[in-house]
Amino acid sequence: MKEISWSEFEAVELRAGTIVDAEEFPEARKPAYKITVDFGPEIGSRRSSAQVTHLYPADELIGKQVVGVVNFPPKQIGPMRSECLVTGFYREDGSVVLAVPEQAVPNGAKLG
């Protein structure tokens, strides 16, 4: 594991946001959803692809708060442009468990 400095960690903008839309992403190579996350008034809404179809039906994602990286450059994923990275933990079976705040926080709150 590579060690990083505190300043490198501080450069990563990990923010809380609420999923406001989730839909199937049939063009993705692995099963995924296209999701839109509201990161509050300073950052706004961002779109991403999330490979969380094994554990989360799309309709149950709406309203869920998540932790996302909002300062990566946009990345083209098939026909969509991903504007953030929604974080999660991989299980042994390859499914992804979303990283979520334990209690509600304002959209845009920074992890630190």
Image (cartoon, grey):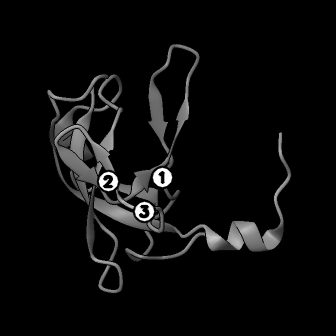
Seen in the picture, residue 17 relative to 2 is either above or below; the reply is below
Residue type, mark 3 in image? Pro
Q: Quadrant of the N terminus?
A: top right
The mark closer to the camera, 3 or 1, is: 3
Mark seen at residue 68: none
Badge 1 is on which residue?
A: 100
Badge 3 is on which residue?
A: 73
12, 17: nearer the viewer: 12
Badge 2 is on which residue?
A: 64
* Extreme residue in the bottom direction: 42
**For the residues marked 3 and 2, what is the alpha-carbon distance in whole angstroms?**
24 Å
| Neighbour tally class for label 3: few under 14, some 14-19, many 20 plus, Cα within 10 Å | few
96, 71: nearer the viewer: 71
Going from the N terminus, do you reach mark 2 or mark 1 first? Answer: 2
Instruction: Tell me whether the residue at label 3 lies in contact with that at label 2, contact meaning CB atoms closer than 8 angstroms.
Output: no
Query: Residue 48: x and y, percent?
Result: 30, 51
| Neighbour tally class for label 1: few under 14, some 14-19, many 20 plus, Cα within 10 Å | some
Instruction: Tell me whether the residue at label 2 lies in contact with that at label 1, contact meaning CB atoms closer than 8 angstroms.
Output: yes
| Neighbour tally class for label 2: few under 14, some 14-19, many 20 plus, Cα within 10 Å | some
Residue 44 in view, yes or no: yes
**For the residues marked 3 and 1, what is the alpha-carbon distance in whole angstroms?**
22 Å
Going from the N terminus, do you reach mark 3 or mark 1 first? Answer: 3
